[in-house]
Amino acid sequence: MSFKILKFNCCGLDIHKTWIFACIGITDSSNRTEYKQARFSSFSKGLNELCDWLAKYHCNDVCMESTGKYWIPVFNILEQHGLWVTLSHPKYTKPMKGNKTDRKDAKWICDLYMCGMVKPSFIPPADIRELRALVRYRYKLTCMITGEKNRAQNCLTVSNLKLDDVFSDVFGKSSRSITEQILQHPGEKFDVAPFVHGRCKTPIEEIQAAVDGAISKEQAVKLRQCLDHIDELNKHISEVEQEILRLSDKYEAALNLIRTVPGFNKNPLTAIQVLSEIGGDMSCLPHSETPRLMGRMLSS
């Protein structure tokens, strides 16, 4: 059985941490394909040599698997050299079982690609990829803060300090002031009234009863570290957000359009998160892909 060849000069790449195996398939007018194979280092020098090798055979069309994070620097350098790069999920390029080698894998990817049997992955422009990296990092920092808050709450719970029963936010202004007083003067009784914000609806008597506990020296050390770490993480998030806002300035029109969706205008970063995942150009996506990408992004 033979397949119709759609790409008459293309390359398949099998990417590893240290080495990259490349296979160019050049098909003549008689549908006879000649293969050129080579191995390159994954260092920047080796990737530039790969680009020169592709230029030698006038090959501007490259296909590769999304192997971990190793494909990213390869993709970036090939893109900078003006090559058309198709990235595919490994499930679409998985070779048949048998006598498997890296060179055979590169040839297999090349054969699939030249016959149009590779489903490309969506890769946004370079500036959107940078924005996406920062937005996802901000999300990770937010998750770290949640973890530290849970540990801090655990310190308060085992010390029978019931701040979560009298404050809606244990890390709010009033509750944090009381916590700092407890840490600075462990074991001492004090009047909570000066530390409670005037708009707090909980009676002072209940708050006073909630702090009638005893925190040990060890729990105090742990709680102090948790709170300091939360403050540090909030500082990092603030700095990352400044860079996110700077990178997203050029997409203000697209962001304003996204914010017309109900619920997307409450937090300015929500629209930026959507933009970082799907980009600003919807013409490159099939209509069926956009809802799936947005649903995956919102579920994270």
Image (cartoon, grey):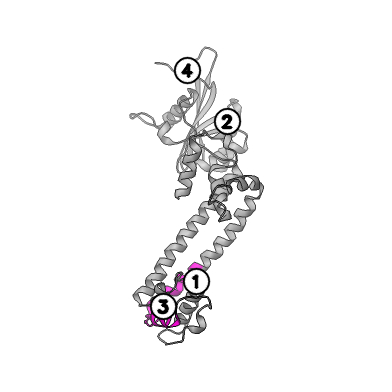
At which x and y percent is residue 275? 57, 46
Name the front one of labels 2 and 3: 3
Q: Is residue 217 magenta?
A: yes
Query: Range of the magenta residues?
Result: 203-230
Foreground of the two, 115 or 142: 142
Name the front one of labels 1 and 2: 1
The residue carrying mark 3 is 220
The residue carrying mark 1 is 172
At which x and y percent is residue 289? 49, 36
**Pointer 2: residues within 10 angstroms few (<14), some, or many (20+)?**
some
**Pointer 4: residues within 10 angstroms few (<14), some, or many (20+)?**
few
- Give the structural element (helix, strand or loop) at label 2: helix
> Please, what is the three-letter code of the amino acid marked with disc 3?
Ala
At which x and y percent is residue 19? 48, 39
State how far apart marks 1 and 4 are (Cα): 66 Å
User: So how many labels did they put on this image?
Assistant: 4
Foreground of the two, 225 or 252: 252
> Please, what is the three-letter code of the amino acid marked with disc 2?
Trp
> Please, what is the three-letter code of the amino acid marked with disc 4?
Lys
The residue carrying mark 4 is 4
Is 45 displayed left or right of 101 in the figure? right
Q: Which mark is residue 53?
A: 2
